[in-house]
Image (cartoon, helix red, strand yellow):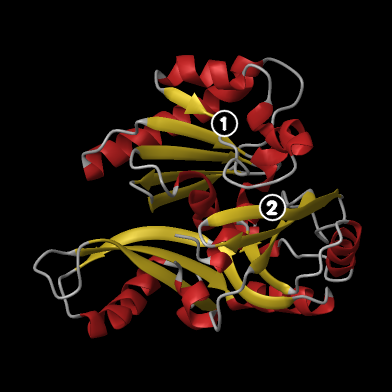
Amino acid sequence: MSNFLKNLRLFLPKRMVGVDIGTSAIKIVEVSHWGHGKTLENYGQITSGAIYKDSPLAIERSSRVLASDFVPLAIKGILEEAKIKTKEAIFSIPDFYTFCTSFDIPPMPENEIAGAVQYNASQYVTLPIKEVTLDWQIISGNPGGSTPLKIFLVAVPNQVIQEYQAIAKNAGLELYAMEAEATAIARALVKNNKKTVCVMDIGVQSSTVNIVDAGILKRSYSFNFQSAKPGDLEFWAAPLVMELKNISAEFLQSEQKQVEEYYITGGTANLPGLQDYLTKALGKTVVVPNCFADFLYPPILESKLRQMAPSFSAAIGVALGGLEIP
């Protein structure tokens, strides 16, 4: 569980709302659990071009500003339409608002790690450290041991956190936590998979590739690759294949581990022919995972939820984090 969740955890709720504010749609889920069982209570979404004040295609990623007047109203509308009563919510922070990296630090006692992470973060994060909130976890090695520790770091601008806090308040929600989209998607789709999996989240304006090894997020890359438009599938997907091969090769060289499977998620994951094309181009198993698969819900929703699942991975992931399901 991320430090955001640890720091804000005051109790163990039975229900949680997950909110994912994307560039073209807002997705919300309400989930619950009893023991080890999970139930999808409600879900809803709204598609709109008014989520951001300026074009998400702006060169500076930080220039993407949420429409603070429209977004809370849209969230309220979804909550009302879906009849969601739970107030505790976790928001997924999109990849274009976060900076992710991993690095090694020397062996050291646990009480010295936070200071070492802070020092090293200043070498990787482009913004002044005082202007960001850091979230990190140890992905290999043990505190006090004799081998280096590998750290996975997420930095989020404080301004973004303040914007999300204001949106939650104005939408009538109690902000339980915020979490990077990459971490949420890894939890929703790969947590119990012991293989080395490369997860592609193909968004409307940008895409993220995450490598999850034995359930632990170890790499996260964001790059400009947009959802498909009508046309030649192979021509559109070729740059993605090249990116995936390069990322997989870098991971093999640095970690001595082969990517064993590829997952595709995001709204484009269901594009006809994409899964088969990637399977052939990559020479590995390519899966479109269903983030709702382990949930209880009315059987009549099976077909609809399977189609919608790739778009809801981040919302499901943050909600699961709040429930702390083993």
The x, y position of residue 50, in whole percent, is 87, 56
Picture residue at 45% right of the left edge, 32% below the top:
262
302 and 177: which is toward the camera: 302
At label 1, the amino acid type is: Val
Q: Is residue 175 above or below residue 237?
A: below
Secondary structure found at label 2: strand
Q: How many marks?
A: 2
Q: In this view, does 88 lie above or below 307?
A: below
Q: In this view, does 112 lie to the left or right of 165?
A: left
Residue that label 2 marks: 40
Picture residue at 84% right of the left edge, 69% below the top:
72
59 and 120: which is toward the camera: 120
Picture residue at 57% right of the left edge, 68% below the top:
322
Secondary structure found at label 1: loop
The answer, for residue 27, to whether it is visible in the render is no
Q: Quadrant of the rendered structure where residue 232 is?
A: top right
At label 2, the amino acid type is: Leu
Residue furthest front as drawn: 35
